[in-house]
Amino acid sequence: MSDVSLDDVLSVLDAWNLIVVSNRQPYRHTFDADDEIAVDRPAGGLTAGLDPVVQETDGTWVAWGDGDADRIATDDDNTVRVPPEEPAYTLKRVWLSESDVADYYYGFSNRVLWPLCHGLDDRVTFEDRYWERYREVNHTFADSVVETLDQDAAAADDTAGDHDTVVWFQDYHFGLAPQFVRESVGTDALLSQFWHIPWPEREVFRDCPHGAELLRGLLANDLLGFHVPTYCANVLDCVSTMLPEAAVDWESWTVSLADSDHETRLRAFPMGVDTEGIADYAAAPDEGFWQEFRADYGIPDDQQVAVGIDRLDYTKGIPERLAAIERLLEAHPNWLGEFTYVQKATPSRTEIPEYRELGRQVDRDIERINDRFGTDEWQPIIEIDDYLSEEALYGLCRHSDLAIVSSLADGMNLVAMEYVSAQIDRTGVLLLSERAGADELLGDAAVSIDPTDTETFASRLDLALSMPDDERRRRMTALRSTVETTNIQSWMADVFASTLTLDQPPTTETETETDVRTR
Ligand code: GDG
């Protein structure tokens, strides 16, 4: 991590034209119950963190307009100024048909790349039309970026001074768009991409349909970011074995393609969360909050509470977690009636059959465990399907004695960091899968688990529940110090600092940071 602050970077970014590209949009226009137009806004995570940066630079954000009132709210260029109450930047919407969404989003993105990148290749379902549509939609997004660049260039001719552009692509939905933009604009813009999910080992990735084309698409970027160094190394390994025309420099983590006008740097930027904002949410509710929350969801008083917060996704290891809880209650009956597990599960991608089946399996498992061990006064597992407000979510994290993150694979896993950020009283324990990217940062002070080893997982649960207060406090203090330094603001500062110095000759990291401050 560098010591460049977000303010340093913002003062430099001011001279740049920033274009962010993501599948999900930061503001969505919908019709409410009275047929009035309402605006949904970013609630947390990356979108909320990035929104003030794009506001500060008066940039453009290109994203899929998926709201039912989005078209009415946009002009002939498909743009709308946001935020609605104090417009500060341009949201440019891309329109996708139902079949685009089916094949580009649910198809190639989520039935091929998502399972494959998480190393769960037996879950991959591939159809030719998924790839064709992924290409087409990537082209549509790229066209929208190029249109923005052209308009900005025309406007810059009328004003004094040059305007450099940086385009920042988010995630695995856009494996080809950088190449299409590069083909149109050459080196007139810096292209950067952050891949939010893992990158698998080459033995897995080599089975990716059109994998070589995807790698070429990504190598159109000047900078390619991942959460942890292992994912960067896996990409370099895939490139060196699958693209004969590529020269890989393992020292500097750069790749050049034959006849290319640029080189691509790979870098690890471990993403964090808005630690201060989360701590504020956790501290906000009044004293009665926890008692009321317990009463609302039927969690008895005077019991230890463990929490799991996940999108209902097969990568999150929820059935494996439930199996470990069942084993805990079987092998350590002293916890019967003394511990409740709260599963906050948010339905996700329900158009895909595997996701619907996972929801049914989780319901069945919870019912079985509750039938087996529950009594009239106590149910070992409480499932919450409601979407919780930030105050309720982080209040739940603050008061839970344990958080369980048991991903089978996970790019980073923000929930682990959010739990730690909300633990303002430092009384909780984090159980963290050694297969989540977050383990590389938090593994030392968390209690590590292998989600597939039910027996050891159950004994780690017992260990965590029995952990003395001073040991909890010691571990949580160490975890909090890590998440406070690796937060969402420092993550963005690092990514931008690295991106903006790409047109400088390669130098040491320290010189690179200085360049950013003084440019
Ligand atoms: C991908 C990668 C990577 C969930 N329920 C509620 C709620 N949430 C929020 C959590 C958290 C987010 O959803 C889930 O984030 P994760 O990081 O755990 O997982 P993915 O969605 O799979 O994210 C992952 C991430 O991208 C970022 O790069 O870390 O590896 O898979 O923020 O809090 N939020 C609220 N109410 C809920 O009910 N408010």
Image: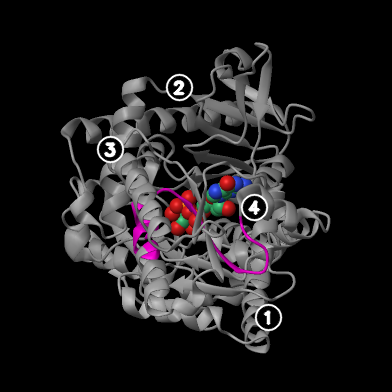
Mark 2, mark 1: which one is toward the viewer? 1
State the residue lying farthest toward the right.
Answer: 286
Residue 263 in view in this figure: no
x then y, percent, for residue 20: 55, 41
Q: Is residue 102 left or right of residue 243?
A: right
Q: Residues within 10 Å of mark 2 (few under 14, many from 20)?
A: some
Location of the C terminus by quadrant is bottom right
Which residue is labeled 1 in the image?
477
> Under 8 Å from ligand 1: the CB of mark 1?
no
Q: Residues within 10 Å of mark 4 (few under 14, many from 20)?
A: some
Disc 2 from disc 3: Cα separation: 25 Å
Q: Amino acid at mark 4?
A: Leu
In the displayed structure, 432 sits above or below 25; it is below
Which residue is at the front of the view, 271 or 234? Answer: 271
Which residue is labeled 4 in the image?
393
x then y, percent, for residue 104: 32, 33
Q: Is residue 288 left or right of residue 316?
A: right
Which residue is labeled 2 in the image?
95
Mark 2, mark 3: which one is toward the viewer? 3
Disc 2 from disc 1: Cα separation: 47 Å
In the displayed structure, 3 sits above or below 68; it is below
Q: Amino acid at mark 3?
A: Pro
Chain part drawn in magenta: 299-322
Q: Residues within 10 Å of mark 3 (few under 14, many from 20)?
A: few
Report if the CB atoms under discs 1 and 3 are less than 8 Å apart.
no
SS class of the residue under badge 2?
Answer: loop
Tell me which numbered mark, 2 or 3, is placed earlier along the sequence.
2
Tell me which numbered mark, 2 or 1, is placed earlier along the sequence.
2
Check if residue 242 falls in the magenta segment: no
